[in-house]
Image: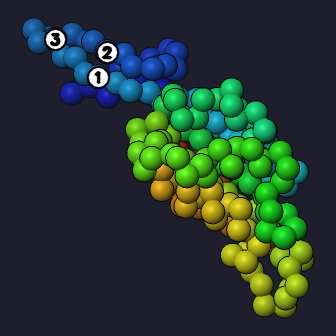
Amino acid sequence: LTVRKPDVWIPTEQPIQGEIFAKKDTGSARCQSKVIAMPKVNVLFGGELAQEVAERLVTEGKDKGVEMVARDMADFKGLKLDEEPSVSIFVVQTVENDEAPESSGACIRFLKRKTHPADHLAGKMSFSVLAVGDSNLLLDRQTTTAKDCNKVGQGLDVRLAEIGGTRFHPRGEADERTGLQEVEPWIEGLWPALLAL
C-alpha cells in the first residue's frame, strides 16, 4: 500500500484504516495530505452458486492484497450497510420463478423498502453486483440467455443505484446452463475497478 504525497510516494507497512494524515519532510517544506483508505470489502452472497463465486473472490483478493470477507446475505444486518462507509460486492442467484434464494430475501426486501430516500446510501456504499442464474429453469430455453435468468441481480443492481449507492464496476450476468462462462471476464474487470477506489 502506498500513500500519495504531492511529490513523494510514502510506502506504509500496514494497511491504512479509516481517515488519517500522512506527513513527510521534503527539505525545508513540510507537506501534508488527507488520505482515505478503502475499507474492507464485503462480498455478500445469496445462493449456492453465488457462494462458490464469493469464496473464489476472497481467495483471489488475498493474492492481490485486498482484504475481503464473504458473508451470506442472511447476515447483512451486522454489516450496517446503510450506516457505515463500505465497499460491497453482491453475488446473488435467481432461482425458480424469478425469486431470490431464501437466505437473501430479507436483505433484498430491506434494500427495496419504499421508505428509503434517494440518498440513503449516498457516500456510504460503493457496490457491484454479479447476478447468477440458470436458464434451464425457464420455459423457453432455446432462445434465453443470461439476461433472461437473472432478474434478482438485475433488480438489486438498479435499486442500489436508486437509493444513492455508487456502482464502481458494471453488473455481471452469468448463466449456469453455459457453465457460468460470463463470470471470468467480469472478475477480470473487477480487480482494476476495485483497486482504483
How many numbered badges does the structure rendering display? 3
Task: Quarter of the image for the C terminus: give it.
Answer: top left
Mark in the foreground, 3 or 2 = 2
Within 10 Å of disc 3 (Cα), the crowding (few <14, some 14-19, many 20+) is: few
Q: Nearer the viewer, residue 118 or 175?
A: 118
Q: Are marks 2 and 1 in contact (CB under 8 Å)?
A: yes
Q: Residue at x 21, y 10 (%)?
A: 25
Q: Toward which corner of the image does residue 33 lie, by quadrant?
A: top left
Give the residue type that dot 2 points to.
Answer: Phe
Left of 196 or right of it: where is 137?
right
Q: Nearer the viewer, residue 108 or 43?
A: 108
Q: Residue at x 65, y 44 (%)?
A: 110
Query: Which element type, helix, strand or loop, lies under badge 1?
Result: strand
Which mark is drawn over residue 101? none
Left of 143 or right of it: where is 87?
left
Mark in the foreground, 1 or 3 = 1
Q: Nearer the viewer, residue 25 or 166?
A: 166
Whether residue 9 is visible: no
Q: Which residue is mark 3?
A: 30
- Residue 128: x and y in percent read 57, 52
Give the residue type that dot 3 points to.
Answer: Arg
Which mark is drawn over residue 34? 1
Query: Which element type, helix, strand or loop, lies under badge 2?
Result: strand
Which mark is drawn over residue 21? 2
Whether residue 157 is visible: yes
Query: Which element type, helix, strand or loop, lies under badge 3?
Result: strand
Give the residue type that dot 1 points to.
Answer: Lys
How far apart, in angstroms, are the residues tagged by discs 2 and 1?
5 Å
- Residue 14: x and y in percent read 52, 15
How far apart, in angstroms, are the residues tagged by discs 3 and 2?
13 Å
Q: Residue at x 78, y 38 (%)?
A: 74
Left of 96 or right of it: where is 36?
left
